[in-house]
Image: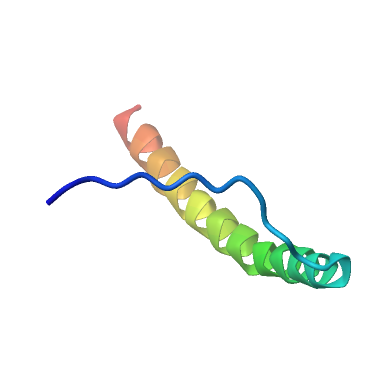
Amino acid sequence: MEKQEVVVTDIQMPFASMVVFMIKWAIATIPAAIILFIVGTILMTVFAGIGAGLR
C-alpha cells in the first residue's frame, strides 16, 4: 500500500463556531483534569506506602 501524505493549509470556520468549539474544549478539560488528579493521588499514595514500608 502506498503512503499518501495530506497537508492542511487552511481551515475556514466561522468565528462563532470557533468560540463554541473552544468553550466545549475548555469544559471537556475539567473532567479530564479531575480524573488525572485522582489517578495521580492514588499513585502517590501507593508509592508513599511502598516507601514507608521500605523504611
User: Which residue is at the far left?
Assistant: 1
* The one of 16 and 1 positioned closer to us in this rendering: 1
Q: In this view, does 21 lie to the left or right of 39?
A: right
* The one of 37 and 32 positioned closer to us in this rendering: 32
Q: In this picture, is 34 found above or below 42?
A: below
* The one of 9 and 45 positioned closer to us in this rendering: 9
Number of on-image labels: 0
- At x 47%, y 48%, the residue is 45
| Percent of width and height locating residue 5 | 36, 44
Q: Is residue 17 left or right of residue 35?
A: right
Q: Is residue 29 left or right of residue 15?
A: left
User: Which residue is at the far right?
Assistant: 16
Quadrant containing the C terminus in the rendered view: top left
- At x 38%, y 33%, the residue is 51
| Percent of width and height locating residue 10 | 66, 50
| Percent of width and height locating residue 34 | 62, 63
